[in-house]
Amino acid sequence: MRLVPEDWELMRVGDDGQLERMATHVLAFDVTDEGDLIYSDGGGVYRIAGDRSETIINDLAGVTQIACLASSTAIGK
């Protein structure tokens, strides 16, 4: 179950200066050393890789803070 509304978005500025939506329902996020995005919607924790593929890391509910302290290999990549 997502804890935040859809309009809580994770955006990036592309090389062309245009905004790009990376994810919706974003409660918390961080960026790995490799540039992957790790985020929570309050109902799970997800990874968006450089190729824009998205995978679920864990379906743990209630995650409200994300901090990438180690290489992404340490979290199951």
Image (cartoon, rainbow, N blue to C red):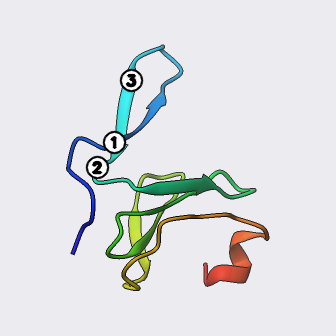
User: Mark 2 — residue?
Assistant: 24
**Nearer the N terminus, badge 2 or badge 1?**
1
- Position of residue 50 measured from the top left corner of the image (x, y, whole percent): 54, 52
The amino acid type, in three-letter code, at marker 3 is: Leu
Residue topped by disc 3: 19
Label 3: element kind: strand
Q: Which quarter of the image is occupied by the C terminus? A: bottom right
Circle 3/circle 1 CB separation < 8 Å: no
Q: Earlier in the sequence, mark 3 or mark 1?
A: 1
The residue shown at (28%, 54%) is 25
C-alpha separation, residue under disc 3 versus residue under disc 1: 11 Å
Residue depicted at x 40% and y 60%: 53
Camera-nearest label, 3 or 2:
2
Tell me if mark 2 has few (under 14), some (14-19) or many (20+) residues whose alpha carbon lies within 10 angstroms of its own.
some
Question: Is 52 placed left or right of 76 in the picture?
Answer: left
Mark number displayed over residue 9 = 1
Name the amino acid type tagged 2. Answer: Thr
Q: In this view, does 34 lie to the left or right of 40?
A: right
> How far across and how far down the image is residue 13, in percent?
49, 25
Q: How far apart are marks 3 and 2 (CA)?
A: 14 Å
Look at the numbered disc 2 and give the secondary structure of its residue. Answer: loop
Badge 1: residue crowd in 10 Å (few <14, some 14–19, many ≥20): some
Q: Residue 17 carries which label?
A: none
Residue 36 location, quadrant = bottom right
Label 1 is placed on what type of residue?
Glu
